[in-house]
Image (tube, grey):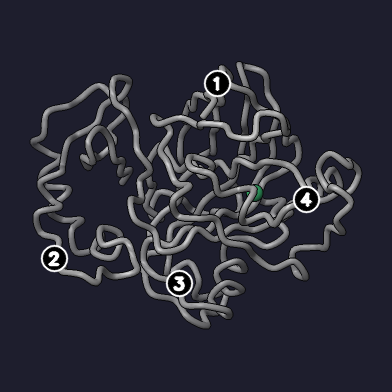
Amino acid sequence: MRLCRFGAGRLGVVDGDSVRDVTAALDALPCYRYPLPCADVFIAHLEALAPRIRVLAASAPALPLAGLTLLSPVANPGKLIAAPVNYQKHLDEVRADPNLHHQAPIPVIQRAGLFLKATSSLAGPGEGIALRKLDRRNDHEVELACVIGRRASHVSRDRALEHVAGYTIGLDITIRGPEERSLRKSPDTYSILGPWLVTPDEIDDPGQLGIRLSVNGSLRQSSNTSDLLLGIPELIEYASSFYTLAPGDVIFSGTPEGVGPIRPGDVITAAIDGIGAMEVRVRAA
Ligand code: MN
């Protein structure tokens, strides 16, 4: 199943070039009073809601996908976790280019660990990217993103994929410079997820997916998730050894080589095999 969010917070099932509006399925979600849970309520209940979503989708009118403003398929993640330099060729290009490493040592991911992006940086492809610090270099990074479906703490790599709710395309937009990654990668709209969430039954192996990004039609990044240094199971094992993963938490798995600058007016196209493609417009904040 391919689940999207669009418009004013509506929920849809993607069916070819159209979307079936299944927003009514959200009526079954529990209501909360303050304090709210630190997890995405929809993702936490996705398995329970799935039968109702399928029934609604069968009779909902088909909306043309092209006319919809797509939002992030996860609305309220508790954590946006990201893997730095998780492809060998990207590690090589960062170490070779002073514009990328800024005189900081770039250790391998097994030493660097993971970092967090602010959840307020999250936006959908239809909302676009609003660039800040235009006097500095802002780069695109396309990444396979995994959405956690079940609470996970100290999970081994062989049980890791049981905790996945689905996969989506992530853009980890980055201001280059000397500050901590969590600051440079956290302005509003610097974490894009989309175009939809693909449930794991549609992805045989998240470690065998072609991944591409182009800017204004010219190809900048092209790789395969088979080149990840730590794959999705290893990332879940590693992350869950430090903290509990909650439903809706997102893991950006890292970007392959070919990162480069973007400017206001650019149009990014990002695609991952088995998920789809999304177009994202870039503007000045
Ligand atoms: Mn990244």
Q: Relative to 96, is 56 on the left or the right?
A: left
Mark nearest the camera among 4 and 1 is 4
Residues at marks 3 and 1 touching, judged by CB atoms closer than 8 Å: no
Instruction: From the image, tell me which residue sits under label 4.
Output: 178
Name the residue that disc number 1 marks. Answer: 267
Q: Secondary structure at mark 3?
A: loop
Q: Residues within 10 Å of mark 4 (few under 14, many from 20)?
A: few
* Amino acid type of the residue tagged 4 in the rendering: Pro
* 95 up-or-down from 218: above or below: below
First in residue order: circle 1 vs circle 2:
2
Q: Residue at x 12, y 28 (%)?
A: 61
Q: Residue at x 31, y 40 (%)?
A: 4
Relative to 160, is 212 above or below?
above
Residue at figure coordinates x 55%, y 41% from the top left: 171
| Secondary element at tag 2 | loop
Q: Earlier in the sequence, mark 4 or mark 1?
A: 4
Look at the numbered disc 3 and say if its residue's Cβ is closer than 8 Å to ligand 1: no
